[in-house]
Image (cartoon, rainbow, N blue to C red):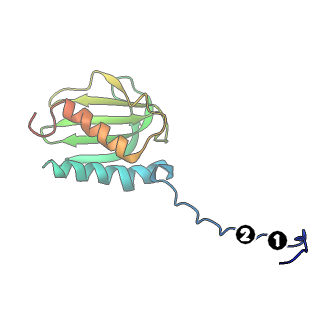
């Protein structure tokens, strides 16, 4: 047993540095998130239900009904059913609107979409879009 006190020059062993966490998918730039994650996941979910969309793409364009340019995802499903998921800005956490149109009609209403969510995630965005389309009876056998 030693009676010598530890000196201040002795350094405690440093804890190993934690590996940096990989960035969350939602932290990717908007175009990359939509093109490489969101659209492929929506396509996969639709195909699981036996639906092959005629169109599903990201673009900047005029909002249906009210106009004004915004980033959006446009989808066309069999039977000429169309939807527009509009973002307030090129950020998945920005305010979102959705417009829907059945065959032979134009959209007449913009609805707020996911307005109560503080932080958006890929699974939430995909599931709520599919839930909304299913609410229109566009998916499955409702």
Q: Which mark is residue 132?
A: none
Q: Locate residue 74: give its quadrant.
A: top left
Neighbourhood count class around disc 1 (C-alpha, 10 Å): few under 14, some 14–19, many 20 upward: few
Mark 1 lies on a secondary structure that is loop
Please tell me which residue lies in front, 105 or 15: 15
Spatial CA span between label 2 and label 1: 8 Å
List the single residue furthest toward the bottom.
Answer: 1
Please tell me which residue lies in front, 7 or 21: 7
Mark 2 lies on a secondary structure that is loop
**With 27 as the anchor, is 52 left or right in this view?**
left
Please tell me which residue lies in front, 109 or 113: 113
**Residue that badge 2 annotates:** 14
Q: Locate residue 141: give its quadrant.
A: top left
**Residue that badge 1 annotates:** 11
Q: Where is residue 114 in the image (x, y as percent from the top left)?
A: 39, 31
> Can you say whether 132 is above or below 126 in the image?
above
Please report contact status of discs 2 and 1: CB closer than 8 Å, yes or no.
yes
């Amino acid at each position: 047993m030693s009676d010598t006190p530890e000196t201040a020059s002795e350094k405690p062993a440093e804890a190993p540095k934690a590996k940096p966490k990989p960035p969350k998918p939602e932290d990717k730039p908007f175009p990359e998130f939509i093109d490489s994650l969101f659209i492929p996941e929506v396509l996969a979910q639709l195909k699981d239900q036996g639906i092959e969309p005629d169109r599903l793409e990201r673009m900047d364009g005029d909002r249906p009904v009210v106009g004004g340019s915004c980033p959006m995802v446009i989808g066309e499903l069999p039977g000429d059913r169309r939807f527009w998921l509009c973002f307030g800005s090129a950020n998945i956490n920005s305010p979102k609107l959705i417009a829907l149109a059945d065959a032979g009609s134009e959209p007449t209403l913009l609805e707020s979409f996911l307005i109560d969510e503080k932080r958006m995630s890929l699974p939430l965005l995909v599931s709520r879009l599919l839930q909304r389309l299913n609410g229109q009876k566009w998916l499955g056998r409702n």
